[in-house]
Image (cartoon, helix red, strand yellow):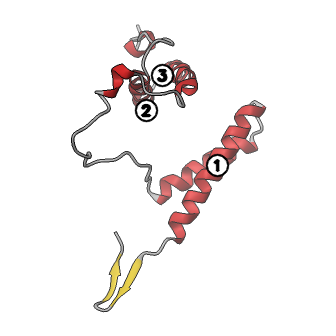
Amino acid sequence: MATINPLITAPFDHNTDFTELADNCERFCEAMLCEEDPTMKIALCGRLAACLALLKPTLHEPIPRDLEAYLTVDSLPLHQPEFAPESDALCGYCEAIARLLISNTLAPDTACTMSDLLAELTSYFAERLKAPRWLATDAGVEWIN
């Protein structure tokens, strides 16, 4: 008998705070990457979509007072979130979205969103490819990290 991933029944609703919803989104994606059963992948993706649907309308709302302390630090963190995939992965993302759009199987609003994402990713990809890699100094040419 197949094992049901406990994330499928993890409770959340419109009262769940955005930090918990964000954690859920990460958990759903991580589980989808590890899942081999196609039906379970779709179920996890559905849970992700539900979480994102709850998050979207809250993105421009003020931070609730009860979360201010949680989001306040005494010193800047050493790590800041950033999106920095390798060029080959980024190219793969762009290709996959282009193929998805070519298939013409998406709802019009989803196709529009995917086109916007493709434009953003492609622009980022092109900028990364064309970015300077070396710096000319008095001591010679140095690699830019």
User: What residue does disc 3 label?
Assistant: 37
Q: Which residue: 39% across, 11% down?
A: 3
* Above or below: residue 67 compared with residue 4: below
Q: Report the quarter where the C terminus lies.
A: bottom left
Residue 30 placement (x, y as % from top left): 40, 30
Amino acid type at mark 3: Asp
User: What residue does disc 1 label?
Assistant: 118
State the image quarter where residue 68 is shown.
top left
Distance Cα–Cα, label 2 vs label 3 = 11 Å
The tag on residue 33 is: 2
Q: Tags 1 and 2 in contact by the CB under 8 Å rule? A: no
Locate residue 66 relative to residue 86 in the image: left or right: left
Residue 114 in sight in this render: yes
Kindly state the secondary structure of the residue where label 2 is placed.
Answer: helix
Amino acid type at mark 2: Leu
Locate residue 11 relative to residue 115 in the image: left or right: left
Residue 39 in sight in this render: no
Distance Cα–Cα, label 1 vs label 3 = 28 Å
Which of disc 2 and disc 1 is earlier in sequence? 2
Residue 109 placement (x, y as % from top left): 74, 32
Distance Cα–Cα, label 1 vs label 2 = 22 Å
Amino acid type at mark 1: Leu
Which of disc 3 and disc 1 is earlier in sequence? 3
Using the image as rendered, state which of residue 36 and residue 109 is in the foreground: 109
Using the image as rendered, state which of residue 114 and residue 82 is in the foreground: 82
Crowd tier of the residue under label 3, counting other residues whose Cα lies within 10 Å: few below 14, some 14–19, many 20 or above: few
Q: Which residue: 53% across, 30% down?
A: 59
Using the image as rendered, state which of residue 55 and residue 97 is in the foreground: 55
